[in-house]
Image: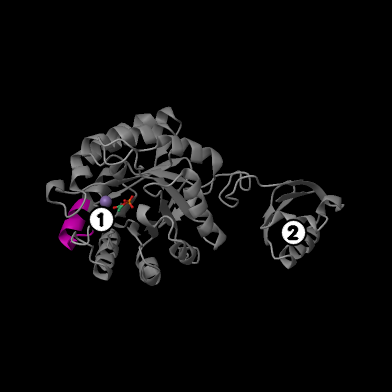
Amino acid sequence: MIIVLKREASEETAREILGRIEEKGLKPLYMPGTERIVLGALGDERVLGQLGLDGHPMVESLKPILSPYKLVSREMHPHDTVVRFGGTVIGGNAFAVIAGPCAVETEERLRESASAVAAAGAIGIRAGAYKPRSSPYSFQGHGPEGLATLRAVGDELGLPVITEIMDTADVEAVAEKADMLQVGARNMQNFALLKALGKVTKPVLLKRGLSAKVEELLLAAEYLLAAGNEQVILCERGIRTFETATRNTLDLNAVAYMKQKTHLPVFVDPSHGTGVRDLVAPMALAAAACGADGLLIEVHHNPVDAWSDGAQSLYPHQFQALMETLRPVLAAVGRDLA
Ligand code: PEP
Ligand code: MN
């Protein structure tokens, strides 16, 4: 429920109402604006009825929050959220590109790929230290050593780093080393992990599950916000459909939809979204055109030799060319490259 207070309502009145909301076991929200104070109450709205707020002299109006995801919804928070990634800001007018190899392979290899994406203008480096692989016999990532390598290379280049978190047991270690934590498609509904990530002070990039509906992605994000972390980026990375020509079907409808329904920044990963190197750039441009706030792209200095996802990894020169073609597309939709 959104509770709009009258213009003349004092902060003291707001605090008194918030206290009553909390007493009923609901989650109170305080949203002071320039013109008036707006309050929120999350939980069973029938309980809220018992507070008799519709008759309160300082309450202007009561509005139920219709969407099942309350904190993530624009109804609750009309302005765009910005997310801090190292020293940069994601979600404003600037369009952010984060790139790097699928996995941390060796320090030399990461340095080579990461330097190339940095030189082309990426604002951050991606690389997995913990890899969720379909087969238990595939390269699983170097774990803690991979994290240390990623941190070291990020520091060398002066760029923030993002890496995947797969297990609640690793949350502290990954949050200590990474500037942003990625929840992969396979863990989108790992609710224990989401609750744990709600408590960290680093931002989270939440990828859409392979077969997840947009509503399920938004409800998964709601777990993060409800647990206390508002620094969340949503990421469309393709879904499984009947189509087999590409690895996944990149759902750009979801991007435009989520930009309307939520205040969180929305990223697109055209690498996993297509699985095909030559389709990455066209879909990256399409993502920029349809309102995404940034891209997560796999780039490897030598994709044919990559330990994972080589077929969808760009060569550095392709990434550089993409960065150049992004500029006019972004300018056409009134945005700049970060
Ligand atoms: C990745 O980013 O390398 C990855 C495993 O992505 P996803 O979870 O989208 O499959
Ligand atoms: Mn990958």
Give x and y (percent) for residue 71: 59, 52
| Residue with the mark numbered 2 | 47
Q: Residue at x 52, y 60 (%)?
A: 229
Displayed quadrant of residue 161: bottom left
Q: Residue at x 54, y 44 (%)?
A: 262
**Left or right of residue 65: residue 333:** left
- Estimate how packed mark 1 is, as few (under 14), some (14 to 19) or many (20 or more) residues with alpha carbons within 10 Å: few
In this rendered view, identify the residue nearer to me: 307 or 187: 187
Residue range in magenta is 104-113
Which amino acid, mark 2? Val
The image's colouring method is one colour
Q: CA distance from mark 2 to mark 1?
A: 45 Å
Q: Earlier in the sequence, mark 2 or mark 1?
A: 2
- Tell how many labels: 2
Displayed quadrant of residue 80: top right
Compared to residue 195, the image places residue 101 above or below, namely above
Give x and y (percent) for residue 146: 25, 65
Which amino acid, mark 1? Ser
Give x and y (percent) for residue 297: 30, 45
- Estimate how packed mark 2 is, as few (under 14), some (14 to 19) or many (20 or more) residues with alpha carbons within 10 Å: few
Q: Is mark 2 within 8 Å of ligand 1?
A: no
Q: Residue at x 43, y 64 (%)?
A: 193
The reply to whether discs 2 and 1 touch (Cβ–Cβ < 8 Å) is no
In this rendered view, identify the residue nearer to me: 138 or 200: 138
Q: Which mark is residue 3?
A: none
Q: Is residue 285 visible?
A: yes
Q: Which mark is residue 134?
A: 1
